[in-house]
Amino acid sequence: MTSTVNLTAPVQNLLDQFQAEMAPKKIILQEKQSQFPATMLDPEESQMVLTKEGDIVLFVPNATFASFIVAHELMHLQQEGRQSVEISYLKQTNTQFSQFLDQIGQELRNIVLHQAMRQQLIDLGVLTDTAQQAIKKLITEKLPVDESNTSALVIAMKAIQLVDTYTFVGQVPDWQTKFPKSMHIADELWQIVTTAKLTTNRQIRALILQLLNYFAEYFEKFGLQIPSLADNLLLKPVLSERQLKLSVRQLFQLWRLPDAKTTYLVKGVQDEQAVGLIEIAKNQQQEQAMLALYDLPVVDFLKQFQLSYAPRDLPVFPKDEH
């Protein structure tokens, strides 16, 4: 059942703009029962679902903060419309590893995208004191405290939650007593996040990669047996018009997956980060055929294997276009 959700004038204006651009398709606001009390707000509890008719249902789990929820989701929709950087993962035989890769990839991406939209949320007037206190309250009461025996992996994942919360409410010194270990990592990450410029797809991807590298070093430091983030997370490439005309060998390497007959991992030459998976038939793996593949223009290679990319210097939000 569609609800008449009350929005502030700036957020209603933003929604009307989206509605006009999507017409005749619609964005439908629908209330949803939150799993948390009304005094708590989880920015990630809201979601958007595409219907078979092509409409978008935007679920609002807490009507008290409807303007924040709607503005936040519309910012994500705008980012996606600008072909923002996506991240996925290689399925693992160990389902827990698959879940971990999915979680860390999406949460680090969210930190970056939330930081990129932060100023717009402020300008829209939705990061009110009440909304910020509700977000803080959720973390304060629901996130387990750091114990002496809390594992390095749990500390890392809690730190990611704290940093994502920082993007909405800033640092919270009071949490030092509850999360001293996690906050140490979170504060280091926050320094990285807040010193990055986040206007274009290229800058968005660069920061995601920087955070992935940070955790790759962290996991190695503590001897955690975690699948390689560079090999098992697929970070969408960002490419300029000039790069699209280069040969594949200038930008990418192809590595056949262990125990696979036809599946190859595509990795960046410079950053060695995986960007996608492709299938090459057995009869096309001879040296001459592979060399011909490496000689293809990047744009033809991407089309042939249906790999997507984000325009490198395209601003993530239209407001940053000149």
Image (tube, rainbow, N blue to C red):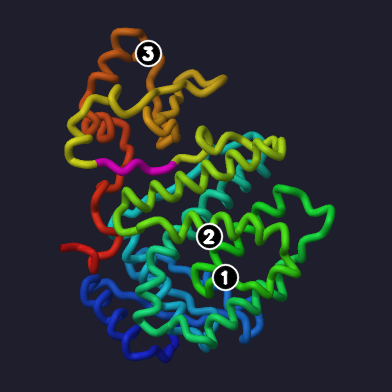
Q: With respect to residue 48, does 249 lie above or below?
A: above
| Secondary element type, mark 3 | loop
Query: Mark 1 to mark 3: distance in Å?
Result: 52 Å
Q: With respect to residue 92, does 318 lie above or below?
A: below
Residue at the spot 39% in from the left edge and 84% down from the top edge: 125
Residue at the spot 38% in from the left edge and 24% down from the top edge: 253
Query: Mark 1 to mark 2: distance in Å?
Result: 9 Å
- Give the tally of numbered discs: 3
Q: Disc 3 or disc 2, which is closer to the eye?
A: 2
| Secondary element type, mark 2 | helix
Q: Nearer the viewer, residue 263 or 213?
A: 213
Magenta stretch, overall SS: strand
- Tags 1 and 2 touching, CB below 8 Å: yes
Find the magenta span and give its range.
Answer: 235-239
- Label drawn at residue 285: 3
Taking the image as shown, residue 183 lies to the left or right of residue 83, namely right
* Residue picked out by circle 2: 190
Mark 3 surroundings: few (<14), some (14-19) or many (≥20) residues within 10 A: some
Task: Name the quadrant containing residue 138.
Answer: bottom right
Which residue type does callout 1 highlight?
Gln
Outermost residue toward the left in this view: 322
Taking the magenta stretch, the answer to whether it contains residue 188 is no
| Secondary element type, mark 1 | loop
Residue at the spot 43% in from the left edge and 88% down from the top edge: 5
